[in-house]
Image: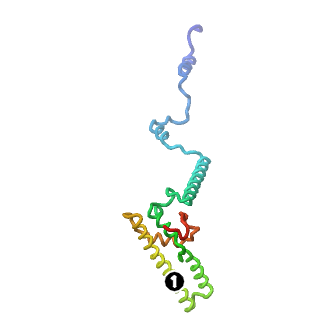
Amino acid sequence: MSGGAASPDNEQATPAADQPGKNAGKGKPTPKRSEVERARRQPYTPPATDRKAAAAQQRDRRRAEQQRRMDAMRRGEEWAMPAKDRGPVRALVRDYVDSRKFILSEYILFGVFALIFVIFALGATKHRSSSLVLYIELGIVAVIALEGLYHGLGATRLVKRRLPGESTRGITWYVIKRGLRLRASRIPPARVNRGDAI
């Protein structure tokens, strides 16, 4: 009896020893295949520190690109100019405006400063000072309009003669905007001198 017979305790322990692949307890159910695939398809989200570094690099690149474009614009390179400044018509109109010996509208900003001085010095509530301010305002607008029309017609005639078939739409407004800026602050910069023949 004691030789070959196994005790009931040994018979119960044997099946557990024969199944080593069975884990006693995972603590959570096995995920479904669809859940695993969904988690795999989700984009990778970098740590917060990486996002900050990437944003800083992107800002630096954008700032460098803007600076490069601005420098190229100041050199007069057409690829860097806004669409409104591109083309042979706009270039010819800029040369026409920049070659004028004197444009009163260029100094109109000083008239605006004078108007502000008059308003504060005399007091805009009085009838006489109010009339004076109104006359100055009308004078500034009249100078800009008349001078812009005069140079706009000259620039339009030049474009029609030099570049026949090209559109002359918006030339007068372009001349006015160009003429209102001081020569040193014009972008694209002037490439001709005052008084040069165009």
Q: Residue furthest front?
A: 197
Colour setting: rainbow
Residue at 50%, 77% (x, y): give it: 144
Quarter of the image that includes the N terminus: top right
Q: Is residue 15 depicted above or below 165 in this figure?
A: above
Q: Nearer the viewer, residue 83 or 124?
A: 83
Please provide percent x and percent y for residue 96.
49, 68
Q: Residue furthest left?
A: 165
Please provide percent x and percent y for residue 176.
48, 73
Q: Tag 1's secondary structure?
A: helix
Q: Nearer the viewer, residue 13 or 51?
A: 51
Q: Please tell me how crowded label 1 is: few (under 14), some (14-19), or many (20+) other residues with Cα within 10 Å.
A: few
Please provide percent x and percent y for residue 107.
57, 76
Residue 153 placement: quadrant: bottom left
Q: Is residue 97 depicted above or below 66 in this figure?
A: below
Residue at 42%, 67% (x, y): give it: 159
Residue at 58%, 82% (x, y): give it: 115
Give the residue pinned by disc 1. Answer: 139
Q: Is residue 20 depicted above or below 49 in this figure?
A: above
Residue 187 placement: quadrant: bottom right
Amino acid bearing label 1:
Gly
